[in-house]
Amino acid sequence: MGDELELNNLTRPLKDFTAGDDPHIHIKDFFAVCATMDNGGISDEAIRLRLFPFLLKERAKEWLYSLPSGSVTTWTSLASKFLAKFFPAQKTNHTRKEIMGVQQLDGESFHEYWDRFQRLLASCPHHQIEDWQLMQYFYEGLLDSERMMVDATSGGGLMN
């Protein structure tokens, strides 16, 4: 009973994952909760493997239980399969295209555009786009007036 109560208290801040949620955010939140646990000599890997199923709902839980017995023996394997299922390659490709074609909106401040760009990057941390390219996409997406301001602030053309 005590262990069950401790598990409930530790996982309460975590939202149960359903198939429509962002799997990257769920894993980050899951890691944060796991890091607060007194592992009592149990490896982090074992804790993650044991707790993760309790935080899945509906199709996500059905997916986990449909995996062949013995096919998941490490946290890395489980996380990879989870991300492949709930953030498939076509979604990654779509998000990469959004990153590459990002545009500042009329009426959107520089900081609002920057924040939106950062959220876009965070939604797909495995985008595999080099930092210099990210800077170029962001810069090229600026409104002309903002780009001129950036150029003036940097002492000339930023991307020259």
Image: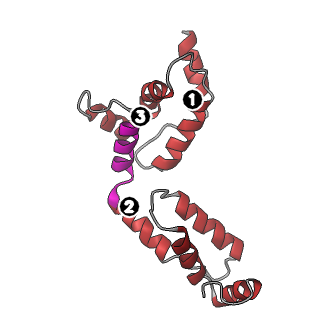
- Residue 70 % position (x, y): 26, 27
**In percent of the image, x 58 and y 68: which residue is there?**
117
**Type of the residue with mark 2:** Lys
Is the residue 135 above or below the residue 158 in the image?
Answer: above
Magenta stretch, residue numbers: 75-89
**In percent of the image, x 37 and y 66: which residue is there?**
93
Q: Secondary structure at mark 2?
A: helix
Q: Earlier in the sequence, mark 1 or mark 3?
A: 1
Q: Which residue is mark 2?
A: 91
- Residue 132 % position (x, y): 55, 73
Does the CB distance between marks 1 and 3 fall below 8 Å? no
Q: Residues within 10 Å of mark 3 (few under 14, many from 20)?
A: some
**Type of the residue with mark 1:** Thr
Question: In this rendering, would 48 be left or right of 142?
Answer: left
Is the residue 146 above or below the residue 102 in the image?
Answer: below
Q: Residues within 10 Å of mark 1 (few under 14, many from 20)?
A: some
Q: Quadrant of the N terminus?
A: top right
**Type of the residue with mark 3:** Trp
Q: Quadrant of the C terminus?
A: bottom right
- Judged by depth in the image, the label closer to the viewer, 3 or 2, is 3
Is the residue 148 above or below the residue 3 in the image?
Answer: below
Does the CB distance between marks 2 and 1 fall below 8 Å? no
Measure the alpha-carbon separation of dots 2 and 1.
28 Å
Q: Which residue is mark 1?
A: 11
Q: Secondary structure at mark 1?
A: helix
- Here the colouring is secondary structure
- Residue 104 % position (x, y): 60, 79
Measure the alpha-carbon separation of dots 1 and 3.
18 Å
Q: Which residue is mark 3?
A: 75
- Residue 46 % position (x, y): 45, 24
